[in-house]
Structure formats: structure tokens, C-alpha cells
Amino acid sequence: MSRAMCSLKTLGILISLSLTCGVQSAWPFSISEPKPLSVHEAGQHIPVVLELKDLPGVTKVNYYWYREDEDMLQELVEQKLALVATATSTPPFGGSILIPQEAIGIYRLLAVAEQGGRQSQVALLAIFDEILINIQPKGQLLEIDFQTDKPLRLGRAGMSQVYDQVDFLGKTLALPVIGRFSDGITRAIRRHTAGTTYQSANENIITVDQDGVLRLTGNGETSLTVKNGDQEATLGILVEVDDTPNRPPVSDPGTTQMVSAGERVTLNGLKSYDPDGGSLQYYWSQVRGSKVPLLDPYSAQAKFLAPLVAEERTFRFKLRVTDIRGADSLPTYVDVLVSP
């Protein structure tokens, strides 16, 4: 069967399902409480209210927490369901949800509907809503620490097993920064949304981005200062790696795409490049929207089938590339807007 015939067959199935399921141009399915970017306390129960009207066949709604811009597959595997709500819940398909004790900074609350009926229909539907909220701990930050050897020795200086294959200039690694709080909870505070800032003492040896991702730029001994609120900590760093000049690659995931449900979507990273002319390794991951099966995530062009949505929804994907010598790009992002 030709590719064109397959596409027509897929489109025909989606049209048929749209008619039998009663798909409209827009179904109300949205989180009305809590409000986007509202501030809440870690470990607190908060009410969740879902607006859901005239949406056929919904049997339950699953709620998840996950950190902004983190790989959804990893997060949803690690995180248990935060809440399962049905029509008999109070309020219907909502309830009281526990904010994780260890949370700090910007988190996503994702609500995903499950429908009864034909399994073939369920597989194609992607009915969800998500909001960002700001989570702050109840206790005060008492101390900043690093979950690593001190000083941090990279490369021939004594590579830790935590940082595998840190052998070349241009390599990046996410520094594990934690904070100990007066409520007895230790929290990961590496990201800037947790209020953490960084300063490298020598950018000819180490650079650092706003989320604590280090890049090796040269050999030598230096230090990194981390601040959060009125707390500060300094980590000594010793780098001894292959000093062959190697410029880091640049990832380019393309521009925003606007597609319709049922379309085959290609995420195109072919414009990514290595300034030194080497070959690249690719890694795509999803950081927003209900999870979609992503084909060929380790190729320049990953693909997925745009799911059937109740109303326009945004799916966001992250691309990172690595050159032949092990230097990494910083992550870049692309949005795919899917319409009914």
C-alpha cells in the first residue's frame, strides 16, 4: 500500500471516529482551579476543579505533577498518580490534591481524561489540560550542598561515576544542587525557578547556565558559587580532560508547527550542526502535553501521529545534540500546535 493510500486510510478512520464520538470543534476541558501561576505551599492539599461539559464517555481524569521542561517520559515513570477523579468525586472529576513535599519552583499540573468505549477510540484521543503553578516550601532554606565529591574532579583528575564519559572539552553535566530546609525536607534546587543563581570563577574552565548545567571549556582549577536567598555555597572544581580544541554543537529543532489531528508530524533537527564539521547524535524528548509515542527519538527527524484533541493543544519537544567527541549542545525547544 502506498504512503498516500495509508494517509488517506488514517484520515478516513479519524473522520469516522470524529462522527461516532461526537467530536466538536471545542469541548470545555480545562482546569479552573488552581489558577495558572498561583503560589502554593509544598506538602499542602489544594482543591482542583475541572470544567468538563458535554464531553462524551469520560470515565475518569488522572492528575500528575511534573517539573517544568523535564522529560515527561522519565517524570511520569518516576511520579505516581497525584489524583484519580471520577464523576462521583467532589467536585466531579476534581478533588483535593497533594502538592509533593519535595517540590520547589515551577511545576506543571497535568489532567488527562480517560474514556470508555472502543479501545481503538481511546488510543486516538488526547483530552488534557495543564497549568503552571509556583510551589514554595513551608520552611526556610538553611544550607546549600552538592551531591558530589568535594572538590569535584572531572576527567583524569578523578572522574566520579556520576559523570560518565566526561573526557572532552565541550561536555556538559547537570550539577546536583540540593537545599536543606527548616521543615526537615531536602529539595533539589538546581533550576533557576527555585531561586538559585550561579557564578563561575573562571569561564575559561567552566561555564554554567541559569539551570546549573556546567560546560567544560578548559583545564585547570576553579570554583563555582551558588546562591539562593541568603544562603551561599562554593564548590571547588578540577578539570583535566583532553584539551584538543572542540567547539560545542548547536541544536536547531525547527520552528513552531501547526497541524491537525491525525497528521503525521516530523520534528526536524537537520539544521543542527557541529562548527567543527563532525557528525551528530540526536536526542528528542517531550516536555509538554499528554504523552505521545515518539518514533525515532535518536534520529535527526523524530515522528509522531498528532492525536485527536478536544480543542487546540500545545505539545512541546526538546532537542539536544552531541558531536563525535562528546561535546553537547544546550537544549532547544519546538512547539507543535494540534487542532481538532
Image: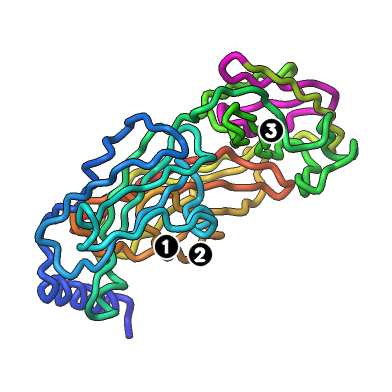
Residue closest to the eye, 125 or 30: 30
Q: Amino acid at mark 1?
A: Lys
Point 60% across, 14% down: residue: 230
Q: Is residue 323 above or below residue 74?
A: above
Residue type marked 3:
Arg
Residue 76 point in image, percent of width and height? 48, 56
Of the 4 image quadrants, the one containing the N terminus is: bottom left
C-alpha separation, residue under disc 3 versus residue under disc 2: 27 Å
Q: Is residue 91 above or below residue 197?
A: below
How many numbered marks are there? 3
Q: Label 1 crowding class (10 Å Cα cut-off): few <14, some 14-19, many 20+?
A: some
Element type where label 3 sits in the image: strand
Asked whether residue 226 is drawn in magenta, I would say yes
Q: Is residue 209 magenta?
A: yes
Question: Residue at (64%, 22%) from the top-left corner?
Answer: 142
Taking the view exactly as shown, the residue that stands out farthest to the top is 230
Mark closer to the observer (3, 1): 3
Circle 3 sits on which residue?
215
Q: Is residue 214 visible?
A: yes
Q: Which residue is mark 2?
A: 296
Which span of residues is magenta-colored? 205-230
Secondary structure mostly seen in the magenta stretch: strand
Q: Residue furthest right?
A: 157
| Disc 2 to disc 1, C-alpha distance | 7 Å
* Residue linked to disc 1: 303
